[in-house]
Amino acid sequence: MAPGACGVLEEISADDLSESMQTIASTMGPWKSGSFRFVKKLEEAARNHGRVDMMESEGKNQHSVAVKRMPNSWIRSGPEEFADMHPHECENPWRNIGVLAELKKKGYSATCELLGVFCDEDHTYAVTTLATGGDMFSWCENRPHPTPDREAEMLPLVAQTFSAVEWLHALGIAHRDLSLENLLLTGPNSTAPQTVKLIDFGMAHIGRVCPPVASLSPGKPSYQAPELHLRREYDGFQADSFALGVVVYAMAVGNYPWTSTKPGRSRIFDWVSCHGIRRYFQRSDITKFFSSALIELMAELLLLLPSQRIGLVKTRSTSSQESQRTVWDCKWLSAPATQGKWRAVSSTSVSTMATETESDAEEAVTGCPASGEVLCVI
């Protein structure tokens, strides 16, 4: 789909997702091993007790696919049985499958398309199109140190990533597990540039306001927005924005800014909680390597308070008619040529902002550690 072609989108509802999951579970075809030829293992699917393989379809129109294999003892016969067996599990493989099916209906092209779901006596197999360029984590590993052309390399990939998440939010879905590993790349060729594919919707939530986090938090420790640790409802879209701030920082620097955002787990993040992200950037070497525009974008994404953090979709607070700034308003991404080439969603959509009741939450998020030395990297 061409950039700007989406316009105002109809959101995916919880009923839509439930219907898709039930339909897929009840209509799965048999897995015919002879229909696919194993090529190589791509990665472990540890949370789903399985693995992802690259396979090649047999027949006249041979093409490579990704196949996620999960034991039936884990995924069970359908979403209801899975929920009964794993009531506290925050990653749900049926939700991932259902979201992929709904996104396909909406024409969402920024993910690996679901081609089919099959099963045999022991396993369930979810088959999707293949992104041949690896993930963003590998992209960072191959570029461990900042270089003069780093920002130019990053710009189209970051713009596409933001576009993919903006489109997802416009459809009413918070991803909740954004990370370098969940951003795949297609290999560039003579007719098409490298493109970004957003995957793994097993922790996604339908709706902007997410329930309080239970014992198992969605997302990886380095990417979790600090408000997730307050045990109260939170804005899933703004939590995604924070995770994207970590993604962009890691792409730029070649490392994570901290190991965890949970109080007491990372001395660096405890320092940031006390003094702020902008002061942290000012006292680090990052200002020597990157433009002030990119640094400001990262800082606005990594602000501790969700009400102050920059977002992906236009919103209005309940107390004001002012629209919240988005990443597309930031200087680093504001050029019409950049947005015209990489942005897929019209800026006319306005998503309802949750009521802000953050008086004591703000103190909990931004309070300095009560005791103990904290580390400031200089």
Image (cartoon, grey):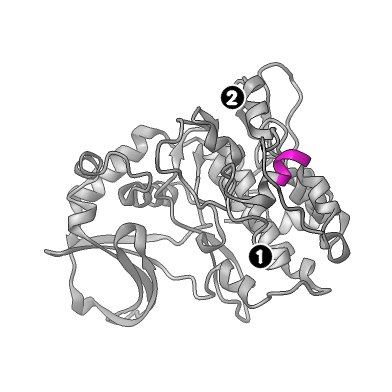
The magenta-colored residue range is 271-275
Residue 114, x across and y down, in percent? 37, 59
Q: Is residue 84 visible?
A: yes
Residue 38 - label: none
Q: Is residue 359 left or right of residue 334?
A: left
Picture quadrant of residue 239: top right
| Residue 127 screen position, x and y as percent | 33, 65
Which residue lies most toward the left here?
A: 121
Q: Position of residue 353 (x, y in %)?
A: 62, 26
Question: Which numbered disc covers residue 255?
Answer: 1
| Magenta stretch encompasses residue 273 | yes
- Tell which circle, 1 or 2, labels the residue nearer the N-terminal end: 1
Which image quadrant is residue 320 in?
Answer: top right
Q: What's the residue type where badge 2 is placed?
A: Ala
Residues 341 and 283: in front is 283
Q: Quadrant of residue 39?
A: bottom left
Left or right, residue 127 beside residue 373? left
From the image, give the main secondary structure of the stretch colored magenta: helix
- Residues at badges 1 and 2 in contact (C-beta under 8 Å)? no
Q: Is residue 356 visible?
A: no
Estimate how packed mark 2 is, as few (under 14), some (14 to 19) or many (20 or more) residues with alpha carbons within 10 Å: some
Q: Residue furthest top?
A: 319
